[in-house]
Structures are given as structure tokens and as C-alpha cells.
Image: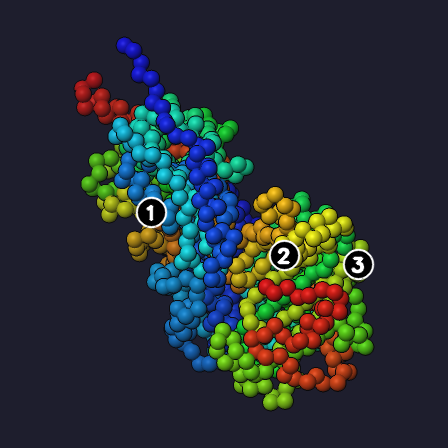
Amino acid sequence: MTVTTFHNPLREGLRFERLPDPCIMVIFGASGDLTHRKLIPALYNLAYDGLLPPGFTVVGYARRPYSDEEFRQDLRRAVERFSRRQPIDPDVWEAFAQGLFYFSADFQDASAYPKLGEFLERLDRERGTAGNRIYYLATPPDAYEVITQHLGESGLAQPDRHESWVRLIVEKPFGHDLESAIALNNHLLKYFREEQIYRIDHYLGKETVQNILALRFANGIFEPIWNRNYIDHVQITVAETIGIEGRGGYYDRAGALRDMVQNHMLQLLSVIAMEPPIAFEADPVRDEKVKALRAIRPIRPEEVNEITVRGQYGPGFIGGRPVPGYREEPRVAPNSLTETYVALKLFIDNWRWADVPFYLRTGKRLPRRVTEIAIQFKRVPHPLFKGMVSTNVEPNWLIIRIQPDEGVSLHIAAKLPGPRIRLRTVTMGFLYGTSFLVQSPDAYERLLLDCMLGDSTLFTRRDETEAAWVPITQILRGWAESPPPEFPNYDAGTWGPPEAELFIARDGRRWRRP
Amino acid sequence: MQAQPPAALPIDTDQIERELARLWQSSPLTERTGDLALSRTSVLTLFVYAPDNQRAEWAREVIGRLSTQHPSRVVLVVANRAHDLESPTVSIQCDLGSAGRYAPCYEQVTLFLPDDGLHLLPSLIIPLSLPDLPTFLWWLGPLPCHDRRFPPIARSVDCLIFDSLESLQPIADIIATRRLVQHVARSTAVSDLNWGRLGPWLETTARLFEIAHWRWALGAITSVELRYGHDATRSVLNPTQPLLYLGWMASRLGWRLDNVEALDEGWSFVLVAPDQRRLTWVLRPQVCQPAFHGQLKHVAFTARDERHAVRLAIELTGHSERQATLRLHVEDRDHSTIEHAFHHHLLDLQRLLVEELQESAPDHLYEQALDEATAAAVELRKLERQREQERHGV
């Protein structure tokens, strides 16, 4: 939603064609980990790069009794620790810190919200923020409903003047199954309009994810072969070497399917599988992503164990260091049946992708940290060079690497130099880090800026969130009806349970070793 | 008198290409050593012209730092006054210390050119450019925009980068640069690093008038005061940056130059807005450290209408060796003040260069600002001539 009508002739042709309007960002959960690790460092980096508007203001809302000055000092320590830019620039920090304020109150306390409104109005007058607000829910999800209800009932959810705007950023997890996601959406929509709601999935803020759209729709050579006639299958891998990093309480209730697949991985799948949008704008892009998600073949409970593999790590070694098993992690039940690994096979039932399997796998405590999408093309119809290969010539692969070493590579067969015809697979690679002359911004920087600008292209819409919950909920139901798995079933530092290898081998395929 | 034959160069560009190919073949490009692989990606060709060995050394340093950000081929052309020219050198430079599993590499060729061999440059640039990729020429030292051999050189590349801070006769060079820009417009984009340094100033100025409280001020400016750095050890002032800034605002807002007067220190310009409002611009030099010679230091706008009055100021503060901070102050009748600061890389040549290398298309904003700056420079030159004539009693 764009409401700015002021035309500034000085803005034309400048590097940033649009800058956000001056605004106040109210962070609920300002004393929490997300605020310290991600939000404030991202905002500081935007300030450093000159991307924040003058008068930009942050109001931290939390229970802890801080003064503004204590809050600023606390956030300065966070920026010193977590910002990608070090050391802190004292001038930039000083100007940025002048816009940091603290509001101490309980989320549950209805009487605090009118006071918050008065406080924001005072800041509007002092800092020229003109009634523009972003409310950021950086709290545990069980606080979302009460906060938005109080914002709505105290009149803070809608702009109080003609040219101003109010937006709400909601962090994942967005529900824990389809029913709870619908219920949460219905609740939010009582107080905010859909175009005011920005559901954040930080994967979409990553440069390489956006580059998938550029790769597919700005190059003429890929789209004609981007379909079932040329593509054998797609593998999406999100492998982490870390464990649950102190998030045992949350993770033991969520598991890998909810934590990774429902949001990040289905987002990756949707940008790979979507049809070309009619414009690179929020709704056309999201319309096509939703269509792709809705085309995922429904999963019957009795087939869930055929198309999924669950795993949970036991003790093992990562990078030569011993690490505990999942059940030994803090705040995890000693007999936990939560999956830390999941592999699954999905089909997208439409003309483009009919019968092309999409294999997804994600896990914790795997041997290498890597996120990639690998597209395997079909083999040539006639093996002209049979017996002339020096090693196994692979079919063509297009690898889109999200992290680390972001880039794109194409595996092709080439003739070895010499009088004989001998073939070998070689890689043509494009690496972001060695090709472009700038450092990519952090995903939160991009997304926070987009929200301030009112661009929701990289945020998920209501129907998208719900469409992503449909197959996940079907899998959860199928698992609930199956006998409990024998966990742990893979050692930390390995590529997951052996069943995952058999699972893909049954289709005559194998997992890539990224 | 018999004309001297133009200098010739014993440089075999094919041999240079063969040597580069041999170097790539002998490097472990496709083999991983440990966990590291050398990486070759072609993005552009950068030619660097250094008029002397001192600047060539400095250019090598900057190019070395750029290697992590990988322009794929760099050809350094060093003008040499010595008669016996050194042979070209060819190398592949890889940054093994960079993060990740891939070490970015670039090709570096160094050529030596006799100082009377400017006309030979296009014959080197064209064969040594990587095919189908943009070609940039970064010209160190004063731009020879008055030299008739120069336009063919500029036309042989997609983008010419120079720095008007290096100019020895800044007012005359503004006028000559505009002529050059028009002359090569069809083939080549011309970029001035000094215009690049103005980027954050333009950005800050634009956002100053986007704050809801002070939007009215854009149409009610009565005067503007600019201060720019002057290193007292230099005999010539360089007002190119403030004149380009003035040119930018005039071109954006439709202001027309009406009159120029010399002050004891600096100049006063009268401009007329489309609504016939008259505004005064005052440009004054301010003694500064050598690094800030010719750089904008301070811009202050005064705006007034029947109901409001405000003074909006942008100043350069807290500068370190390679970075500086722009700080914005606002004071109005209600004494409300907003401070806003962000980083400015005006002293970081590498950053400026990187930004220029990202864009090979003409910058119309620059061209329009240059048009208006040229109009001001023409008037300043008239004033200078008048002064000269008065001094000589003509």
C-alpha cells in the first residue's frame, strides 16, 4: 500500500528512487533475542548506509523496567556484537540512538495501549514521523493475539490521518497447523486489513532467493526448458550443522517440518515452480506462488510414510567436535519424538510439473551447512557416447546455491582434450561473491526496508501461508496415525537416517552430496 | 619544418592474450587445493591510464584491493617519459585470503606508453577488451579534455571515469568536460568521481525536504550557503563540486542563473525560480586538510514564507582516513531539531570506483547538472577575465 503523494523533484534519478517516509517502529518483545541479534543490528546497518529516513524512531515495548538510556546502552552492546559492520561508527550511532525509546509495559495490560498511543503522538510531533507506524511482533507467538487485539481496541491499528500508514510485521511460526493459521489470520484481520500485514520469512530476503526470479524470468534460455519435458526432478536441501541452540522449548514442540519445511522450504519450492507473474509486483508474484502451492498433490494419511522420512540425531561429531544427541539438549524431553530431520517427496499437479518429483530434505547436525536447490535435467534420449566416458557422466544439473558461496552452477559434459572421444562432467559457475562488486545486505535489512516502503512482494500473504500449511498438516496427521519412530536414527555429523537414502533410491535416484 | 612521425609501440596484443591463456592453463583453476578453488568470472575490462610512475604505483594498490571484488581484466597503461620503454607485464592475481571456498582472480596487464603516444591508446584498448563486456577507462590525473587526441580515446570505451578534483584549471575544465560529454555521447558514458562524491549530499538534500514538517520549505528557499574545502598549500581553488551541486538543484527545480558577483572570498549567484522568486547562493572556500580540498563541507538552506521560517543544514563531520559522516540539522521557530547521520565514502576511492564500475550507462542527472554548472562556469570565467583586464589596466 503506497500512500505517499508528495512529489519531490530532488528525488528523481537518485540512487534510491524511493526512501521510506519517516516512521516509528514499535517492537513488541524489545528485550528479546530477535531484537538484539537481528532487528536492531539490521536497522543500524540501514542507518549506516543512509537508508533510513530522518526522524526514524524505534520504540521498544517490553516488561523489563528500562529507561531510554539503559535501552540505548543495551542495544549498543547488541550492535557491537551482532552487526556485520564493525566497529560501530560513533556519529551514526549517536544520531540513530537519539531515535531509540523504551516503553515499559505488559503486553496483557489493556490500559498500557492508550498510553502508548499518547507516547507515539508526542514522538510524531518531536520527530516528524507524521503518524506512520510499524508494529513488529518479536514476541513468542502466543502473545500475537493479545497485542493485536489491544492495538485494535485502542485505535492504534489504523492510521489517524489521511496520508499516514500503519503496518504490522508478524514473525514465524505463523500457526502450528492449518486450523491455527486460519484462526490467527481471522483474528488479525479483525483489527488490520490484509495489506497492512507483513508476514516475514527471512529466506525471501536473501539475495540468492530473489536471484531465482531473475534467473528464471530475465533469461530467455531457462524458461523454455523449465518444465516436465526437460526436468527429471528437483532437490531442495537445507542442511544445518548446528543443533537447536538453546531453543529446545520451542523446537521440541515444532520439529523440522514446521520449523523449516512449512515456511522456508515451501517458499523456495514456490519460486522454483511458479508461473511467470504478469509484473514484478507484490500481488502478481504472490498470486503465482499461491497457485504453485495449491497445486501440490494432496497427501493421503496412509501414504505419508511412503513419501516422508523422519529422523532425530543422536550424539556424534561435527567438525571433529563431539556433540550431544537431540534428547540430551537442554529443555528437550528425554524421550522426545520430535523430528530434527525430514525428507519428503512432493508433486505439483499442473501442466508444467506433472509427475516431476520435488525432493525436500532438511536436518540439524548434518555434516555441512548448505542451502541449495538442485535441478536435474533429463538424460539425452540416445547415449551416443556410451563407453567413452572417463568417469560417470552425470545428467545436466543446475545448482542454485543459497548459502554459503551463493551462486549458480551448471554441470555439463565436455570432451577431454586428446585424439579419443572421452567425456567428463565439468562445472560452469557463477558466484555472487566473485562477480559483483558489492556486499549483499542481510535479509532482515532488505525486508525491514521493504516494509517501510510498503512493498510486500517478499512477504507472505494470507492465502500463501494457509496454502503452505495444507500439505504440512496432511503430513502431520499421517505421522500422528503412524507408530512412533525409533529415534534417534542418525548420528550427528552424518547426512541423516539411512532410510532417507533408500527413500530416494526406490525412485532410481540419489541425493546430491552438496 | 618537418613533422615528427607519431610514436609507435612494439606491443603485440595477440602475444599478451596468448600469455594470459598460458597462465590460466598453468594455474590449478579446475583443481581444488585443499578446500580452495580459483574462480574466474568475467564482468568487465578496466583500463587504467596513469600519467606517471607515482600514480601508477598508487593505481596498482587500488587495483590490488579491488581484486577481492574482481574486475575480470585490468590493463594498466603507464605513460613513460623515458625513451627506452619497459616490456609489457602480464599476471593473474588471486586473493587466496578471502572468505569462502573460492578465490577470486583477475588478469592484470601493464603496458608502458611514450608520453607522446596518446593517439596509440585506442589501438591497444580495442584488442585487449574482453568481448561483449563493458569496457571502462579510469583516467588518473587531469583529464586532457582540451587535447584533440582525446575524444577517439574516450570513444574506444563504454565508460570514461575521471576525477575533476585533479583538474589544474577547474573552471575552464568544467566547460571543456561538457563539450567532451556532448562529443562522445553516442558511444561513451562519462563519469566524474567528484560527482560520485556528491551522491550522499544529493541524497541528504532530497530527504531533507521529504520530512513532512519541512516539505513547504522546498518552494520557499530564499538563500543557500555552500562552503567547500581549500587546502592552503594549493594555489588554485577547485569549486567543481559546489558548482555541480548548484547545477543539480537548478536543473531539478528549474532555477535559472541570473547574475554572478565576486565576493572578497567566494562568489554570490542570483538564481530565479520558475515563480520568479529570486534566491541567493553564496559559495565560499574554507581552509581544510589536504584530503578535503575541493570537497563540499557545509550546505545551509534558509527558507521563509508567511507562516514559517527554517534553517536546514547539512555538514560533513567526524571524518576518518577513508570515511566521513554527513550530519543533518534542522532548526525552526518551534526549536524542533532532528539529527540524522550516515556514512559517506567520499574519501574512499575504492568504494567510489566500485560504484562507478557498476554502471556503464550515461548518467543524465550528472549531464543536466553539468549543463547548469557550465552556465555558472562561463559567468565565472567572464569575471576572471574582467579581473585580469582590470589588473592589466585594459
Q: Nearer the viewer, mark 3 or mark 2?
A: 2
Between the residue at mark 3 and the residue at mark 2, the CA separation in whole angstroms equals 32 Å
| Location of mark 1 (residue) | B61
Residue B81 at x, y percent in the picture:
26, 30
Report the front residue among A220 and B393: A220
Q: Amino acid at mark 3?
A: Ala
Task: Sort mark 3 into few (<14), some (14-19) or many (20+) by Cα contacts within 10 Å.
Answer: some
For mark 3, name the chain: A
Tell me which residue sits at (27%, 46%) in the image: B291
Q: Nearer the viewer, residue B391 or A124?
A: B391
- How far apart, in angstroms, are the residues tagged by discs 1 and 3? 56 Å
Label 3 belongs to which residue? A354
Could you tell me the amino acid type at mark 2? Thr
Identify the mark at residue A58; answer none if there is no mark: none
* In the image: residue B74, left or right of residue B57: right
Q: Chain of mark 1?
A: B
**Quadrant in the picture for residue B356:** top left
Left or right: where does residue A136 sit relative to residue A225?
left
**Residue B249 horizontal/vertical position (percent):** 43, 40
Total tally of numbered discs in the picture: 3
Q: CA distance from mark 1 to mark 2?
A: 44 Å
Q: Mark on residue A391?
A: 2
Under circle 1, the secondary element is: helix
Residue that appears at 33% across and 47% down: B61
